[in-house]
Image: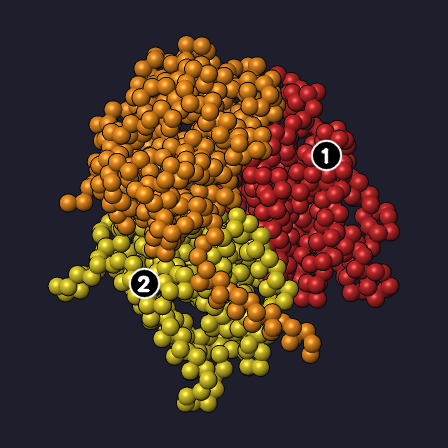
Amino acid sequence: MSLGPAGFNRRHGILILLWAALITVPLWLPHVGGYSALGSKILIYGLATMGLNIVFGFTGGLSFGQAAYFGIGAYGAGLTLKFIAPSTPLAIIVGTLAGGLAATILGPLVMRRRGIYFAMITIAIGQLFYFVVVRWNNVTGGEDGLAGFERQPIHLGGYTLPLDQTRFYYLVLLCFTLGVILMRVLLHSPLGHTWVAIRENRRRMEFLGVRTDLYVWASFAIAGLITALAGTLNAMLFNFTSPQDLHWILSGDFVMMIVLGGMRNFWGPLLGTAIFVIAQDYLSSVTGNWMTFIGLIFVGIVLLFPKGLLGMVDRGARPA
Amino acid sequence: MQLLFFNVFNGLLQGVFYALMALGLALILSLSSVINMAHGGFLIVGAYLAFTLTPYLGFWGALVVGPLLAGVFGLIVEQTLVRWLYKRPDPLYSLLLTFGLALIIQDLTRTIWGAQGLPAAVPEALNQPLSTTLFFITGYRMVILAITAVVTIGLYLTLRYTLVGIRIRAGTRDLETVASLGVNIYKLRALNFAAGCFFAGLAGALASGILGLTPPMGDSLLMPTFVAVIVGGVGSLAGAVLGGLLIGVAAGITTTYYPAASEAVIYLIMLVVLVIRPRGLMGKESIFE
Amino acid sequence: MGKRVTRREVLKAGLGAGALALGTPAILTYGQGEQTIKIGDIDPLTGNYAAEGESQIRGAKMAMAEWNAKGGVLGRKLELVVEDNASNAGISAQKAHKLIDQDKVAMLIGSVSSASALSITQVAHQAGMIFMVTGGHTDPITGSQCHWSTFRICTTTYMLAAGLAGTLHKKFGGKWYFLTPDYAFGHTLQESYQSLLKKLGGTDLGASLSPLGTNDFSSYLIKAASTNPDVLINLTDGQDRINSLKQAAQFGLFKKFAIGGGLSELEVLQALPPEARTGWATLEWWWDQPHTPHVKEWVAAYQKAHPDGSYPSARTWFGYAAMHSVALGITRAKSLDAVKVARVLEGMELPPEVKLQPNRVYFRAADHQLMSSEFPGEAIPDGKYPNIFKVSQIIAGDDVALPATATGCTLDYPA
């Protein structure tokens, strides 16, 4: 997003509108044919894709295995609730850190590659995690998924906050907000600018003496952390998770959401996620051929709107 | 020990199949830099068309015509959709476009032929083992081996000695120069893409003799194909064949000791190759690095 | 320039249409009307289990039509709201939320895979809504993970094993090797067979666990053959079963030893070429029951409703029984209250025109499992569809189920 002149301008206006809409979702969503789990899912997937976009759109790394960290977060949260302690905050923390740790440890494998090789390494890593989760079925439930846990009410001091659908949505919104603030801060810092520079021309950055590997590593690790956070929330939304939350097809869907919304834009992924999730939800209720329509959306976006929807709108803006 | 030998031999036979699929994918990737996620889709198109044509053309007739029609379908797809992407350097777009195409093809297949599995059969004569101890060497698998060999040799000869083949090979090195030399690269790429889809369709028609014929049939074959191409080396057709054989054998060996890991091991191999030598066993350094 | 303007217009039109569409209620509903009672059906229309899902939906629609022809339930017509879960457990949970929160259904039925069934039971339980599991087989659904709100139509893996083990032992011998799909259904089915084998005094030669979605079974078949079994107990289902049997036939293994066991379905038998369509397996329902009343009429009714030459399968019957059970429960409880309906369903016996099999078919009170029969038999290679299976006997569910105390189920009714 361009750092325009200080003070109130159109961008700020749109942002305020966006937050107002998000905060009041439980009020208006049911009236337009939505349900609160859908709203939560959009925010959760939006957080995941915005996290992915740190490495994908801003650093230029084609990560096609991001679902691995989403799944690690989900299983981390679920296993915590099931085996360790019935505490929602603990589940969120454990899952998020697990995903971040995995991404940090695996970063060195990934950081030196580019293009299709970067993509294939991330896919390979993702599928290996998929295999571990499926095989370790005593603990994870294997192919059938992890069930038997439920999100627990949160205890603050003496007050207990039960997490029904609506309250859980606000918890998701809170985590989403924290994630967004973190990403915003990072992307506007020198670190973030270095990432963009690496995306634009990695060779030149190397010639300038920048250790691009380390920056890509950091980007990958942070993306993993945020996507894992989204994963923990997803597990608690449905009180269920399964290996399909780790599969490369979900990774591909994440990428599509980013491209749909615009991968050069901070909010692009959220827009793309909203459209994709709503389209899939609506179309699959209406026709058995919804896969064809989703496929047509993919094809249409690639051919007609390759910069994504916000990319079209932002056409005049300076690169982020 | 005998078990290991059996499994390695068996792995080679399975690898031959992967090699056939990898060849088609590599063909498209090398010349047009298109990452064809719809390869599985062309596979099922070939398989279903072959099944539908068998009552009219017989097993062998359908085996030839089905894949040819898949190639024609590939040509249509290339002309209407894929060729708009050639101007874009980022392979991301071809990946996403073909990803969407794969969804469309699978859904249309399900709509036209139904979700119920179809009883694709193999001629009686081929449908038995050639030896009682080595019972996994069936007549049918020998046919697959023979057809793959013929097709691979045919491709090699075409690329080596025919004009169009030489142009394709030159194109994988430097398409711009080839164009500036007056070759119609649009026709070249179209032909190349159709050829790749023909290979996929052929693999599909052959696969339906061993696997159940259902719309999701191609899904689980797509990733191993990519792995084979990467392991063998992007940009090398011989590498694709080698990669296919290699992962077949690796899966076979793994199954002897730890069957559950037989699919995971190919991803492990790909990971190792990508970390140590990303261009693969026989690949050339390309724009992807 | 011209092209740019066109794209923007497309964009605006698309967004406008999207916003409009969002407000439109689901169209995949059947039997609309005022004041209907909505039953949500989450089944796969796409993906790996699409064939089975389609059958289950057909059965449910037939049942709904019958009830609506008689005036509905509690004076209101039934409406079936179908949601496609794409053979995906996560989407199943999402659709469950949608049906409960947006469509405001009274009850839920559906699922083919055990994973989908489990994910929906979680959501249903939390919402205090009855979920009648149509087709997910894994034992924990009415065992260690049972809930007061969960009921199940299809049989458990123990029942499947118990219905056939004795026959296999008697006919072929006691040296068994297992080909087991690596997920809960396969594991529990294998355990059941193994415990029965032990009781019969047979020899367990070992097992090969194949990942779900395996294409090439050669290595597993090689291993199995090397142990020289009397029977290769093939516990795979669906796609895996089709693949493994096709390959076993090509390897000539059917001539070396018997291959059988596990669960088979019409959808699987139909997809096999003749040489692979052989061996003993258990089905959970079969259309050809000359001695059972009402079956012939039901098959005829099915064919009238679906003139595509197909015959109803066990899955069709599951959907039919599920919808009928839900409707019967509501009618007898004279209420839509889930707890009341659950209490009524406990012990409820299915009437002859619904159960479509001999033997007493009822919901066991302790674990909400329907005690329906097993149909073990042999596939007919040279038969023409639909005569591709011969039932050897119809065993009552009661006779083969684990005692309720052994399932690990404790129902958790709200206080």
Q: Chain of mark 2?
A: A
Q: Is residue C401 or residue B5 the one in the foreground?
A: C401
Residue B53 is marked as: 1
Q: Report how far apart the C-alphas of labels 1 and 2 lie in the structure.
A: 54 Å
Q: Is residue C308 or residue B247 the one in the foreground?
A: C308
Provide the secondary structure element on which disc 1 rests: helix
Residue A169 is marked as: 2
B209 left or right of C229 in image = right
Relative vertical location of residue A19 with respect to residue B270 in this rendering, above or below: below
B238 left or right of C379 in image = right
Colour of chain A in the image? yellow
Answer whether residue C405 is visible to the viewer in this image: yes
The spot of residue A138 in percent (x, y) is 33, 38
Colour of chain C in the image? orange
Q: Is residue C122 or residue B146 the one in the foreground?
A: C122
Provide the secondary structure element on which disc 2 rests: helix
- Mark 2, residues whose alpha carbon is within 10 Å: few (<14), some, or many (≥20)? many
User: In the rendered image, what is the letter of the chain coloured red?
Assistant: B
Looking at the rendered structure, the kind of residue marked 1 is Leu
Residue in view at x 55 percent, y 21 percent: C388
Please tell me in which quadrant of the rendered image residue C285 appears: top left
Residue C41 is marked as: none
Residue in view at x 67 percent, y 66 percent: B88
Colour mapping: by chain
